[in-house]
Image: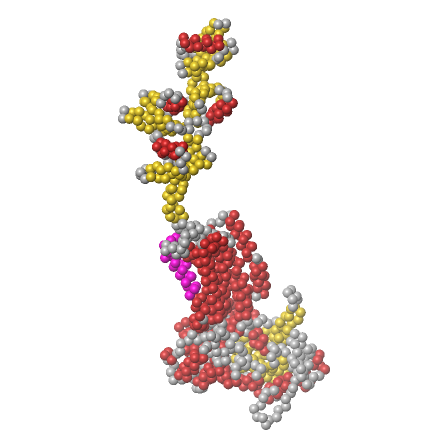
Amino acid sequence: MTERANGIPNIYKHKNEVEDYVIEVKNLKKYYPVSSGLFAKVKANVKAVDDVSFNIKRGTTMGLVGESGCGKTTIGKTILKLTDKTEGKIFFEGIDIHELNRKELRKIRPKIQIIFQDPYSSLSPRMPVGEIIGEAVRDNKLISADKYDDYISQIMLDCGLQVYHKERYPHEFSGGQRQRICIARALALNPDFIVCDEPVSALDVSIQAQIINLLKELQDKYNLTYLFISHDLSVVEYISDTVGVMYLGNLVEYSDKETIFSNPLHPYTKALFSAIPVSDPEIKTERIILEGSIPSPANPPSGCKFHTRCNYCMDICKVEIPEMVEVENGHMTACHLYHKKQT
Amino acid sequence: MNSSNGRNEVPIDKVDSLESPNNLKEIKIDENIIESEANLTKDLSDVQRIKVLSPGMLVIKRFIRNQLAIIGLIITVFMFLFSFVGGLITPYGETEVFKYIGTMSKEYASVTLNEEFRYSVAENMEYNPNMHSNFILSRNKGENTFTYKDENYYISEVGKDFYKVFRLNSVAQITYIRGIMGVTPFADFNIDENLNELIKNALINGSFQFYYQNNFYVLTQNGRDYILGESVNVAFESLLITEPANPNTNLGYEFKYILEDTLRNSNLNTFELEGNRYELNEDDNMAVVYKVTSGGKEEYALISQLAIQPISQDVFLSIQFKEEMERAISDEKDMFIYPDEDGNDVEYTISRLNNVYTIKTETKTHLISMHEKPSYQHWLGTDKHGMDVLTRLMYGGRISLVIGFIVVLLETILGVIMGGIAGYFGKWIDMFIMRIVDVFNCIPFLPLMIIIGSVMDSLEVDPKIRIYYLMLILGIMSWPGIARMVRGQILSLREQEFMLAAEATGLSVSRRIFKHLIPNVIPQLIVLASLGLGGIILYESTLSFLGLGVKFPYASWGNIISGVTTAYEMTNFWFVWIPAGMLILLTVLGFNFVGDGLRDAFDPKMKR
């Protein structure tokens, strides 16, 4: 750890010393405009992310769960500025990365990394593995030339790869090994924060465990902060410190892992968690079956977006958008059920 | 494995290798990996490493296994050796014309019966073609005088077709009133008694012209007086032609006049001039003049009504030759033999057209060996320009291949730049460039080339510069295909996660383009380019065949074929066009095989 820190200029200082948040997302919105025809105007917006706020403390993992298409990946990509935001602010260690110019952005890029879902398309097929991992290290001049080889070898060993893999090409590796390469690529840049965008969902279960363990190991070793995006709740339960639940572009519930898994508040969360398979066939769990399918994000329902499928739907839900309220200590949810309790 | 946490990772790697779902390599190599990974737990030395093939090496391996591709490669290599090395080995040049020395019946001399008057001018006198034509006019009208530049000239017929032209010098004024005559000479002119008497007779008889002592006198009335004019010879006109025996001899007026005079006087065959004695030897149509010297007689001149003219300016026909010829003509023979300078007998043939006799002889000349059949010297014979076909094919191959490569290079560079910009930046730039591509795709190629070809013809563009223009036009016309492909590839690659990852790692834009995008486009580019090469060579041949591309004297396979245009040439001179056609066919086939082979080799799903 100390050895790695030596080679890298620590130019970005923390500004928020109170809580030491690595990532602060404030009222983030990301709309994709829908237009048809050659010169037609924007007809509608697909609200992929609609007013999402959360913070991630240093050294912790936030799990982000939700159905397909609820905007999890969009949040991840927006945090990395791989796509532009529509509104809101994203602070990385106190710096609003969407306000940086290109030069500053390039400097800060290595600090925030991403691991993609598909380990096959996320590696350039015409580049040897050593080059894939080390290319950006060299390009960003993170390490002196004489230490470079050893450094890359060390990272590869850390990620469970062999040094001789350097000269090989991605097509010679299995899915699990490829995901290790992806992790090594991210890790080589000595990031503070890694977005893990469903890193294990393309792998089979035995490999999933290895990768998850590897990620945890590396987190302990390098004090990494993760945003772990997944729709696999058991994986999220295993790796996360805090969990956010998303539905149709909104964060509906946010809490630390123990609280949310023991006491889910939002009806959607409840339904979601009831679907976690239990290994003991003797235990009967109550399954909450949601009616209908997820509405179109281009034309979301009024009021609470979940009201079309909610078992506890009230009149107010159809009209008023529920605000995020803190029900217990640090346990936030956006549901009119809990608004009532407070009043 | 050496990680400090002590987790046992060996089984993991093993499982990884075994499950490998998308393995592109052969099973055999997979086994190697498993074996080596199993060994790794024991030893991690360099010896244990298996040989790893890069994607490029894999492509080469797959390519080599493709028999058709290898055939194509062999053809291509052969074409290169044939064109570039062959051109160096061949002893002949690209535009070397082969000639042979052969005899050819060539016109040597022509003979005509002269029916035009020719004139000889007396010394210090002026007589020009205008005066000559005035003479002809007056003679035809039967007049004996004509006027030229206010001067009167008199014609006097001396013999048959022999006229003397003279003018008068006023020598005396004569007053004659009722039988009494007074003579007043001008200057120092002497009038003797005889002349006086003649003048008087003339005045009495009223005939104002008379001869005296070879001179001709004319009286012209001037008011009441008369002026006596004495003749001065200006020239003579005759149908006969006098030519010297020695080309350096200059025959004077006096000589010619006396000669003609003597010839017409049937009694005489000798005359004397300036102390020399000349003798005439008359024949039917001509007379030879011999100069009598102390040693004997020597040929001096020839007079004849025949105009004998050599065809070539530098040939001088001797009198003996002319005599021989004249004899042959008058005997109505159609040939005669006369020795040349070296004493060898040369055969001359005589042919007649109207009253022109043409003398022909076999002359040695350099002839171009056109359409020569294949032989040891010329393996594929010669073409209609007398050039070696095999050598032309070699040089033509050079031009065809070089044009092919340069055009493909040009279109690839243009296509990659335009397609790359369109694909990478997208939005309105993409829209704009793709519309340009559409416009280029709408331009009909052949009519455009015909127009440009004819424009270059009318501007008389140098054939060498024309080749450069051809390359440029072909390149400019063919980039849109490449641009489309590159754009499509980049559009799809841009959305791949490794491009997002590259962006996330903070790589520079240029590095992202050149290290991540371009290497992934290159396989398709190589395939398209090698397939395009054949097409370009075919295009170039077509254009050259139509006379729009490479022009003579530069050889190209297309214009070698275009040298054969008629059915006769096609059936008889097969050695000119069949080899060129075969070369085009083979080259295009070769490039297509290589291109197909490359495409299959680059496609990882292809397993053979």
Residue B485 on image: x %, y %? 53, 66
Front-most of A37 and B541? B541
Q: Which residue shows up at 47% across the image and 55% down it?
A: B571
- Look at the image and say whether residue B76 sits in the magenta stretch: yes
Residue farthest along the right direction in this orientation = A315
Residue farthest along the left direction in this orientation = B295
Predominant secondary structure in magenta? helix
- Look at the image and say whether residue A196 sits in the magenta stretch: no
Residue A105 on image: x %, y %? 52, 70
Residue B537 on image: x %, y %? 48, 59
Residue B261 on image: x %, y %? 39, 22
Q: Which residue shows up at 67% across the image and 80% down it?
A: A304
Above or below, B344 relative to B499? above
Front-most of B237 and A86? B237
Front-most of B538 and B29? B538
Q: Which residue shows up at 49% across the image and 23% down it?
A: B139
- The magenta region covers B74-95
B139 left or right of A325?
left
Above or below, B155 relative to A265? above
Where, quadrant-wise, is the N terminus of chain A in this rendering? Answer: bottom left
Where, quadrant-wise, is the C terminus of chain A in this rendering? Answer: bottom right
Give the quadrant of residue B312.
Answer: top left
Above or below, A183 relative to B135? below
Give the quadrant of residue B240.
Answer: top left
B152 left or right of A268?
left
Residue A223 in view of the camera: no
Give the quadrant of residue B10.
Answer: bottom left
Above or below, A262 relative to B459? below
Front-most of A23 and B175? B175
